[in-house]
Amino acid sequence: MYRSKDLVYRIKYRARQQKILIKDMLKECELSINTINQITDKKGVSSFSLAKIADCLDCSVDYLLGRTDNPDVNK
């Protein structure tokens, strides 16, 4: 089962690895600054938004969801 706080953790961790600020990533993805809070509040995130985030962070959606520990799988 997917947990929202795990998804948020992986997004923040990957952004830190890539030296990308969350606010800059969200702006580049044309997403609201509240997107991370909405994920945490269990409102979720659309598949399109999650794909944009994965592309920006140069990793797979599977990695962000915790389905793999390899960010390059299914990229």
Image (cartoon, rainbow, N blue to C red):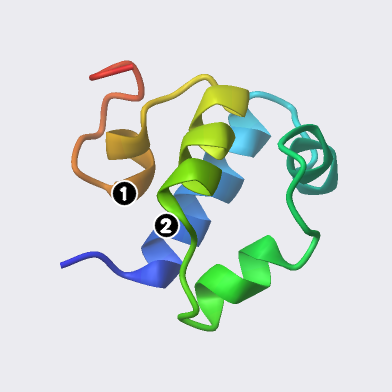
From the image, which quarter does the C terminus lie in? top left
Question: Viewer-proximal residue, 61 or 46?
Answer: 46
Look at label 1 and name its amino acid. Answer: Leu
Q: Quadrant of residue 29?
A: top right
Q: In x, y percent, where is residue 46?
A: 47, 56
Look at label 2 and name its amino acid. Answer: Leu
Query: Could you tell me which residue is drawn at 24 percent across and 19 percent down?
Result: 74
Q: In x, y percent, where is residue 72?
A: 33, 16
Q: Quadrant of residue 33?
A: bottom right
From the image, which quarter does the N terminus lie in? bottom left
Q: In x, y percent, where is residue 9?
A: 49, 56
Q: In the rendered view, would you say 54 is above or below 44?
A: above
Q: Which mark is residue 65?
A: 1
Q: In the rendered view, would you say 36 is above or below 61?
A: below
Question: Viewer-proximal residue, 28 or 13?
Answer: 28
Q: Kindly check if marks 2 and 1 are in contact, taking CB atoms under 8 A apart as contact.
A: yes
- What residue sits right under mark 2 in the picture? 7
Q: For numbered disc 2, what is the local secondary structure? A: helix
Q: Quadrant of residue 52?
A: top right
Q: Residue furthest left?
A: 1
**Would residue 19 be found to the left or right of residue 1 on screen?**
right
Query: Could you tell me which residue is drawn at 53 percent across and 75 percent down?
Result: 40
Q: Earlier in the sequence, mark 2 or mark 1?
A: 2
Q: For numbered disc 1, what is the local secondary structure? A: helix
* Real-space Cα separation, disc 2 to disc 1, in angstroms: 6 Å
Graded by Cα atoms within 10 Å as few (under 14), some (14 to 19) or many (20 or more), the crowding at tag 1 reads some
Query: Could you tell me which residue is drawn at 66 percent across and 36 percent down?
Result: 16
Q: In the rendered view, would you say 8 is above or below 48?
A: below
Query: Could you tell me which residue is drawn at 65 percent across and 24 percent down?
Result: 18
